[in-house]
Image (tube, rainbow, N blue to C red):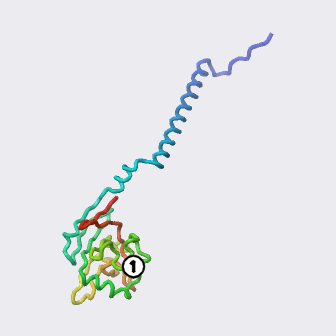
Amino acid sequence: MRMKKPPHPGLAVGDNARRFYYRIGLKLMGVVAAVFVVYVVISAIWGDPTESDSTQATIALRIDLSAIPPGEILERTWQGRPLWVLHRTPEMLGQLEDSAVELYDPSSRWSQQPTAYRNPHRSAEPAYFVVFAQSTDLSCALRWVPADGDNQHAHFVDSCRGSKFDAAGRVWRDQPARRNLVVPDYHIDGHLLLFTR
């Protein structure tokens, strides 16, 4: 006479049913996770073009350039940093060409600015210079020094170490700072200066 093998100790008949439902539940969760991953990948690849266009075209800051008199600076804040917009006069633009030999990086090769603004005036339009008003060595505040009898050229001065920058934010030779001032990315549309996110 053969003896029946006793069931595994600790496993009752209800445990087998419970294990079966756990397996089904885990498989369903795996299927849901796989569908979610596939959805995310497909959304990233194809996405909704109208949604991405509207996100890219969000204008975060708008400045009316016609409100800035020649020779004056408008102060704003952009990305948590002080931003200056200088309306340069024809005399200031002439000084930019004259001072090139006295500058550390006159062609802005080592500067941080949009590629389109890597020109002698470092801007989208020669008359308007847009810059973060912080020095490039210690991020100290800048001071604007207009041209007068004592100063041949209008320029920016670092308030901490005294580094001098011309009206295009280019650093003069033999200064503590070695990089030109940072020019943010912006666009000009008519008389409006636009910053987008």
Which residue is at the far right? 1
Q: Residue at x 53, y 39 (%)?
A: 34
Label 1 element class: loop
In the picture, the quarter occupied by the N terminus is top right
> Dot 1, crowdedness within 10 Å: few (<14), some or many (≥20)?
many
Q: Which residue is mark 1?
A: 177
The residue drawn where x is 20% and y is 70% is: 66
51 vs 77, left or right, is: right
Above or below for 152 versus 70:
below
Q: Is residue 182 above or below residue 31?
A: below
Q: Return the x and y of residue 147 as percentages of the image width and height.
A: 24, 85
Give x and y (percent) for residue 78: 30, 63
Count of numbered marks: 1
Camera-side residue of 196 and 51: 51
* Nearest to the observer: residue 174 or residue 105: 105
The image shows residue 95 at horizontal and vertical percentages of 29, 85
Q: Residue at x 23, y 80 (%)?
A: 89
Q: Is residue 44 above or below residue 102?
A: above
- When asked about the image quadrant of residue 76, the answer is bottom left
Q: Name the amino acid, label 1.
A: Ala
Residue 119 occupies quadrant: bottom left
Give whichever of 107, 136 is nearer the camera: 107
> Relative to the observer, which residue lies in front, 86 or 12?
86
Placement of the C terminus among the 4 image quadrants: bottom left
Is residue 72 toward the left or the right of residue 60 in the image? left
In x, y percent, where is residue 157?
30, 79
